[in-house]
């Protein structure tokens, strides 16, 4: 499986405007299987739960708020490439679409 960090790099979406790329990816993500959706949701939980734990620790140490912000900012860098990669296989083949 190839990882895509941007929607522009997905072969089925190359050359399309951003709104159309997002719409097609949304449609393709609805076709994800249950194990793929579960994998994405578990990954999201593994990232979001530590953020809340770090926020709760700000009473003891205010530096944990900075760590929570850092982890929260890394969320799209971890989740989106995996979501794009899993959804890319459900996009229509660009060569078949043009004919």
Image (cartoon, rainbow, N blue to C red):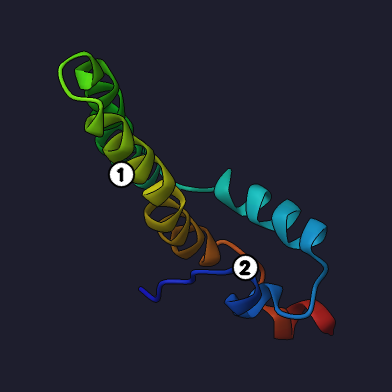
Q: Is residue 84 left or right of residue 22?
A: left
Q: Is residue 12 left or right of residue 80?
A: right
Name the mark nearer the viewer: 1 or 2: 2
Residue 93 shows in this picture: yes
**Residue beneath the point at 61% across and 53% down:** 28
**Residue beneath the point at 24% across and 20% down:** 58
Which residue corresponds to mark 1?
A: 39
Q: Is residue 94 above or below residue 38?
A: below
* Mark 2 residue element: helix
Locate residue 65, reporting x and y percent: 31, 30
Residue neighbourhood size for the residue with mark 1, other residues' Cα within 10 Å, grouped as few (<14), some (14–19), many (≥20): some
Measure the C-alpha gap from mark 1 to mark 2: 20 Å
Residue 6 placement: quadrant: bottom right
* Mark 1 residue element: helix
- Assign the N terminus to one quadrant of the image: bottom left
- Assign the C terminus to one quadrant of the image: bottom right
**Residue beneath the point at 49% across and 69% down:** 5
Locate residue 3, reporting x and y percent: 41, 72
Residue 18 placement: quadrant: bottom right
Which residue corresponds to mark 2?
A: 7
Of pointers 1 and 2, the one earlier in the residue sequence: 2
**Residue beneath the point at 32% across and 43% down:** 71
């Amino acid at each position: 499986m190839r990882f895509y960090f941007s929607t522009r790099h997905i072969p089925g979406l190359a050359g399309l405007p951003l709104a159309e790329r997002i719409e097609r990816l949304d449609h393709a993500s609805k076709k994800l299987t249950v194990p793929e959706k579960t994998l994405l949701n578990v990954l999201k939980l593994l990232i979001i739960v530590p953020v809340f734990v770090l926020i709760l620790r700000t009473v003891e140490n205010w530096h944990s708020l900075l760590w929570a912000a850092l982890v929260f900012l890394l969320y799209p860098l971890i989740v989106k490439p995996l979501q794009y990669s899993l959804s890319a296989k459900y996009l229509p083949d660009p060569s078949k679409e043009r004919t």
